[in-house]
Amino acid sequence: MPVVPVVPGQAAGDAGGVLAHGLGGRSDLPLDALHAIAGGGLAVLASFLLLGVVWRRPRLDPGRGRPLPDALARAAGSPAVRRGARAVVLAACALVVAVAFAGPRRTEQNLAPWALYVTFWVGLAPASVLLGPVWRAVNPLRVLHAAIARRGAACREYPARLGYWPAAAWLTGFVWLELVAPGRADPRLVGALILGYASVNLAFARVYGPAWFARGDGFEAYSTLLARMCPIGRRPDGTLILRSPLAALADGRAVAGQTALACVLIGSTGFDGLTRTAFWRETVDPRDVAAGTLGLLGCVAFVAALYLAAARGRAARFSATLLPIALGYTVAHYFSFFLLEGQMTVILASDPFGTGLDLLGLSGNRVDYRLLSPALVAAVQINAIVLGHIAATAASHDLALRTYPPARAVRDQIPVAAAMVALTCAGLAALLGG
């Protein structure tokens, strides 16, 4: 859902349609689109050329870093902290489902759509990058599975060939729901989807055990992959360390479906930007589900084809280096949505069932759209995309140095660099084409 600040003072109730699909266009942002696109592409190209000169040996090591203070490490690994966090998240999920069915029927008055599409979906990315695989630690589906699983029951081994493919399928369905499906913000539909998602994943976990969630639960897989860019990591001996955010991307672990998952994340946010461009708005009826579906799949296919062609048979090994791009696109398209419309989650949580019981003293408040200026939005959006591609180029270059001699590593990265420049320009064009 690409976002620019809406007219200050807009009532919270006026934002009901926002959840359905985005916030306005790009025409009022204070920048020149052509200069921004050209500058972004040149910045990525320059970073590749510079890396070839100054980065001549592998530098990224996930096991190298500064140990965290003992007190912080003990708190992070405390069973009591983890149990408390799981209880809070499980209770919050139960509340959202209950409000979806028993709360106000109007989207702008019901907590559930805002909690799912804004706070959870958008907030999961920064939480994972800053704190690590948080959803794996507090996943309510793991809690429910542990409560209902039969003790001693034998489970099948999760097939390695499936890898992240189930998670990629789940996230494709979710972004289709978020960006294309009609009536997607209806609270009752949101409640039904949450229950359906939980039921299907718990059924698979009954077959494959808790190993299912790591690869098959789309949200946990998404969170865990993004957490590889967390500056807090673990050494092989389990010590918590402060490390380079790119360190865990250059290990070359090839997992089936990981490339597909990254391409879904990048392509879906690219499609989100495309739907806000003047071209799309003038040529496609927003109610045309078939056109929206083809557009979404086309964007994902474009990203996948471009990367597979550039990687030339090494896509699986290098696929983790796409994650900074996915993060950059997420920040560019969603950060203002999270900070602006995310206020609605807190406001509605003050009286979730609309009974007049104002628990937080916030009922009736409005979203403060003055929190972000158009200039700040533009700066964050452009820099997020450009820096995401530069970080991906650096991680890919380091992994290439681990795989080939320096001269060949640089030579073999030329198609990847060209793809990065093309993706940068395409991403900025979609973002700024309003």
Image (cartoon, rainbow, N blue to C red):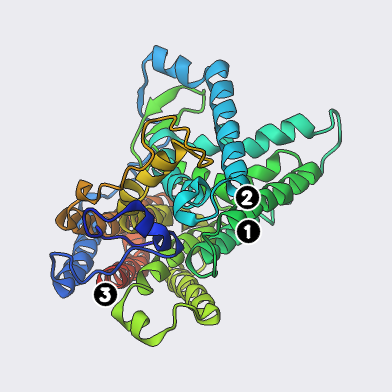
Distance, label 2 to label 1, CA atoms, is 20 Å
**Pointer 3 with pointer 1, Cβ within 8 A:** no
Q: Which amino acid does label 2 sit on?
A: Ile
Question: What residue is disc 1 on?
Answer: 165
Visible residue check, residue 25? yes
Residue 341: image tag: none
Estimate how packed mark 1 is, as few (under 14), some (14 to 19) or many (20 or more) residues with alpha carbons within 10 Å: many
Secondary structure under tag 3 reads loop
Given this view, does label 2 or label 1 mark the residue nearer the observer? 2
Question: What residue is disc 2 on?
Answer: 194
Location of residue 106 in the rendering, given as x and y in whole percent from the top left corner: 50, 56
- Which quadrant is home to the C terminus? bottom left
Distance, label 3 to label 1, CA atoms, is 32 Å
Estimate how packed mark 2 is, as few (under 14), some (14 to 19) or many (20 or more) residues with alpha carbons within 10 Å: some
Q: Residue at x 84, y 28 (%)?
A: 151
Question: What residue is disc 3 on?
Answer: 433
Estimate how packed mark 3 is, as few (under 14), some (14 to 19) or many (20 or more) residues with alpha carbons within 10 Å: many
Between 251 and 15, the one nearer to me in the picture: 15
Location of residue 249 in the rendering, given as x and y in whole percent from the top left corner: 43, 47
Mark 3 or 2 closer to N-term?
Answer: 2
Direction from residue 76 to residue 65 in the image, left or right: left
Distance, label 3 to label 2, CA atoms, is 34 Å
Mark 2 or 1 closer to N-term?
Answer: 1
